[in-house]
Image (cartoon, rainbow, N blue to C red):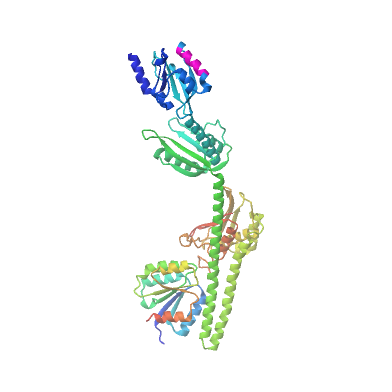
Amino acid sequence: MSHKIGLACIIDDDSMYVNLVKRIVEAKKLCKNLMVFQNGMEALNYFEALLKNLDKKCIPEIIFLDLNMPVMDGWEFLENFTKIKSKIDKTITLYIVSSSINPVDIEKAKRINSVKDYLIKPVTIEDLEAIFLGEVL
Amino acid sequence: MLQNELFNNVIRDFNAGYWELHVDPSREIWSEKFYEYLGFDKKEIEPNIDYFLEHLIHKEDVDVFRDNFLNYRQNHINFKQHIKILTKEGNYKLFRCATNDELPVNIKSEIYLIFFFEIKLEPEQDISKDNFYYKETAQMTATGSWYVDFHKRKSYWDFETRRILEYPDDYIPSLKDSASYYSEDCRQQAADLFFNCAMAGTPFNTEIKMVTANKRIFWVRAIGKPVYNENKEIIGIRGVFQDIDDIKNKELKLQRSIDIIASQNSRLFNFAHIVSHNLRSHTSNLSLLVQLIEDIEDPTEKINLIKEIKQISSSLNTTIEHLNEIVVIHTNKDQERKLIKFQDALNIVTNGIGQMISLSKTTIEADFSQLAEINYIPAYLESILLNLITNAIKYKHEDRDPVIEIKTYIEENTKYLKVTDNGRGIDMKLFKDKVFGMYKTFHYNKDAVGIGLFLTKNQIESLNGNIAVESEVDKGTTFLIEF
């Protein structure tokens, strides 16, 4: 199976989770490159820098966003990301991946246009495969 | 004759019941009104004194009336008397009877008349009954009436207003000092209500605190409305005060209970989410790890992954310890409070972190002169001070050595502890709601765990206190604790 997705991005402060997803992505060869940001601020800095020096190769096709993070949480990132998203000429699919089962969070996420879906941790290997492979269908 | 005519007109207009005397008793007449009063037709009764005394007047009044009547007829001696006269319906009506000089006009007549004015017994009884009910109602509901007269610049209170405000019955309310009838924190409210009512005619119906003559503060329902004259000008305000102190205090007590329950409920809800979220992040990692182990064929790789379980297990433990600490706070809140000197608690804390303080060249300026001690759980006070001091040192400004000011004081019966630092500050626009959240950190420090302030807040709130924060980036942070 060849790589279908070039670049994916995880924004999550849980290093254990990030590590495990990395391994799954490698083992299943789900994408060529995986970027990791420990919180919304780090990710936002990257995207803002990207706007100045637009290199399509550096724009992830998929973002997995956690909600509870220090410094800048998922909500704040989303707010800022929505503002700059339109300036990026590439389809970015964003998933929220959180261990929060609070219905308030889930409802709030569904009302945000740039959010494709809300995944509750734990995600399964099948979920990840479906998302990565589903992207090219 | 002219005078007589005038007089007749007056009498007709006056529409009174009268008996016109005559030298010849057979020519005496009773006025239409008099017949009307008694309900008899002219043919049914005879308008003379003998018939009157025998058939119409009540026995009790016969003797006196006969004397008065004869005296008046013969000697023109005026008289006044109350008499009861039989009506056609068979009952007696009470009349005030009087002679010429009782006439409300200044005409001397040559005719001699006896006027009969009906005394309406029933309505008068009604008024006294109403008055009785009014007094009873006023007393039973503790509702006093009052009136403010703008022209006379006077205010009037009824007996019940005086009673609920604990003033003597002969007390004359003062319009000038009317503000003093309200508790200090309600004077503005009272002034606004009266002003709006007087100027714009806005009626009011409100709950307000008043002060009695004995300086007792109590809750009153104050209702007032404007009084207008014929020209639609507001000439006064009329209203009532009802003593609702018992009800209001119960309501306030209930509201406090509701607030406490609501805040406890919200903490529990919060805690449930924290537990759920924090445990889930570990269990989901565990589940993902197990999936991976099952999925991978290579045995060495599998063994490497199994080692990761140790990491997850240790994180899980740390989380559970943190959660335990919170549970302990809420079960410990009944722990014994002791009178602690702030200075003693501070000494214990600074001794414990002496090295941290000296290495960071931190200066602590403590002022406990206004409030030296407090009845509190010693461990909590130490924990609060420890958390705030270590935070101030951890997040010090890179250009200057930390200075921490600690001050205690009392304001409006509430005890406060204020801790101010000159650190790098927190961006309140971004982090206002998150300062006291669990696992929330605002700085890039590696050792930021995000549990300290969460615990501090929980400890303070478990003892019904409050903590607030003010901060400015690059200037410093102030934590204010209300005990």
Q: In this orientation, which residue lies closer to the viewer: B258 or A42?
A: B258
Q: In this orientation, which residue lies closer to the viewer: B149 or B87?
A: B87
Going 50% across and 17% down the picture, which residue do you hit?
B66
Q: Is residue A7 left or right of residue B355?
A: left
Asked if residue B69 is among those painted magenta in the image, a careful observer would answer yes
Image quadrant containing the C terminus of chain B: bottom right
Residue B197 in which image quadrant: top left
Q: In this orientation, which residue lies closer to the viewer: A106 or B237?
A: B237
Residue extent of the magenta highlight: B63-73
Image quadrant containing the N terminus of chain B: top left
Q: Is residue B478 in view?
A: no
Give percent across and percent down for residue B136.
54, 38
- Judge whether A118 appears above or below B243 on screen: below
Give percent across and percent down for residue B4.
35, 15
- Residue extending furthest toward the left: B2
Provide the major secondary structure of the magenta segment: helix
Give percent across and percent down for residue B72.
46, 14
Q: In this orientation, which residue lies closer to the viewer: B13 or B428?
A: B13
Q: Is residue B334 left or right of residue A45?
A: right
Q: Is residue B1 left or right of residue B406?
A: left
- Residue extending furthest toward the bottom: B298
Asked if residue B162 is among those painted magenta in the image, a careful observer would answer no
Give percent across and percent down for residue B209.
53, 43
